[in-house]
Image: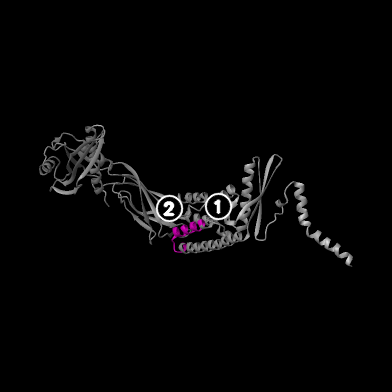
Amino acid sequence: MKRFIPLLLAILILLSSCSSFGVLVRSQVEGLPSWVYNPTVRGDQMAFVGKGSSTVAYNARLASYDDILAQISTFVGEDIRDSYYRELTTTSRISDFNLSVTSEHQRTEKGMIQVYLLARMDTTALKARQTTIYRQTQEREERISSLIKEADRAYRANDDTQAIARYLEAAAVASSGPILDKKHESSLLVDRAIAYIKALHLSFRSSDEGAVTTVVQLRRRRRLISSRVVNASIRASFSAYNSLGERYDDELIFTTASQGSFLFVPHSELLVTEGAITFSLDLDEAIASSRQNLDPALLEQVEDALSQVRTAFPYHRTSPLASTLLYAEIQEYAFDGTIHDGAVALTSFVATLDRFSVASMAVDVKATELEDQIIELRNRFGPAALAYVGSVGVVEEDRVIDQAVVVASGRIQLYDLAQGRLLFDTEDVEAVATGDTLERARITALQRFGTIAASRCAATLFTP
């Protein structure tokens, strides 16, 4: 019996080394070092072998580094490539894991260069990262679940935009790292938000196109009943003129509050006379907060859905004095205080009023005193007429480098000629202009005065 003991021990040793022997044979046959298939490490270490192929050795090495990072990412449960790619490829180390590339093998096969890299790292550091990521994943799942519950509560309370915002926030959280529950994938959460968006509809009631007023309603479309949507932010976009008569695009934000609607009135008195107010759902804040983490393709889907929740309110604005012809007289004074025989400011004033569909006619009044001017206008056009009376003068002339600078100042007043009663006063209006010559600067300053003064006058005619 004792004769068989050495034989049995030899058999056991042979069987236990079959795996290593097989690896050794395989590596010899393929011309690779044994560590490619069976890397040896200390008890406190882990090893990963990266493989990369390319027609260029440098690119093959980069691919091998990337393979190592992919394996580590799978182990810890998070994609770490963006965080450590630069450090690993430039130093062959990752300090957070005590990782170092200790071996490299390169060979050429069928015209392709293959690079194998052996990376050894600290087991404790790697598993600590794995534990941290798992804990973060759990916290992420809890946060997503909490946001979904908030969204569902908001939806039941008809606060649809709050529900949409919570789903977008949940999708952004899901995109920030690994998740465990497939139902929490960012694409599914975005789909839910989009479904809520597509169910929304804007409409009007109690509209007055002439006064540019309407009640804007936001509803959730259903087969049997359309629920009002509360606390939604709605953007009103429109075109208006500034005080210099330049057209620009403007917008205001309203809320449907607790009644699911709001009354729109033209807060901008210089709204263009004819056009359309475009109302749209405003989710800018929710989208902006999600943009950092959410896939741009998913955000584009959300924005496409939002673009459908809009409607236009066409209008043709009319003034209470639309059927009344207003007379206008503006006397111009030169820098030396003498009356200037010109109508630059008056022409600009009338043209600006015309832009707002306010009928006016320029007249020439000989009198220079206000009382005499009103009497002259009453005698010429009757006591029922209304007239703008004013004056403007050049108060400053100068040159700055190669430019002439002129300042014009004055005021316009609207009078009821029957009683000489003052109806409106622009108060002091000042206009500054530059030009190649003093004359050019004077003309521009007077034109600007007329435009600014007329804009102030028109604003009062359309004040709600």
Q: Could you say where residue 289 lies in the image, as x and y percent from the top left?
A: 45, 55
Count of picture labels: 2
Question: Badge 1, how many Cα within 10 Å: few under 14, some, many 20+?
Answer: few
The front one of 237 and 406 is 406
- Image point 45% across, 62% down: which residue? 154
**Disc 1 target residue:** 83
* Quadrant in the rendering for residue 244: top left
Q: Is residue 153 left or right of residue 424?
A: right
Under circle 2, the secondary element is helix
Q: CA distance from mark 1 to mark 2?
A: 30 Å
Q: State the predominant SS element of the stretch in magenta.
A: helix
The front one of 149 and 114 is 114
Q: Are marks 1 and 2 in contact (CB under 8 Å)?
A: no
**Disc 2 target residue:** 284
Q: Which residues are magenta?
A: 155-172
The front one of 97 and 429 is 97
Label disc, if present, on residue 20 of the rendered structure: none
Mark 1 vs mark 2: in front? 1
Say whether residue 191 is magenta: no
User: Type of residue at label 1?
Assistant: Ser
The front one of 181 and 218 is 181
Under circle 1, the secondary element is helix
* Quadrant in the rendering for residue 234: bottom left
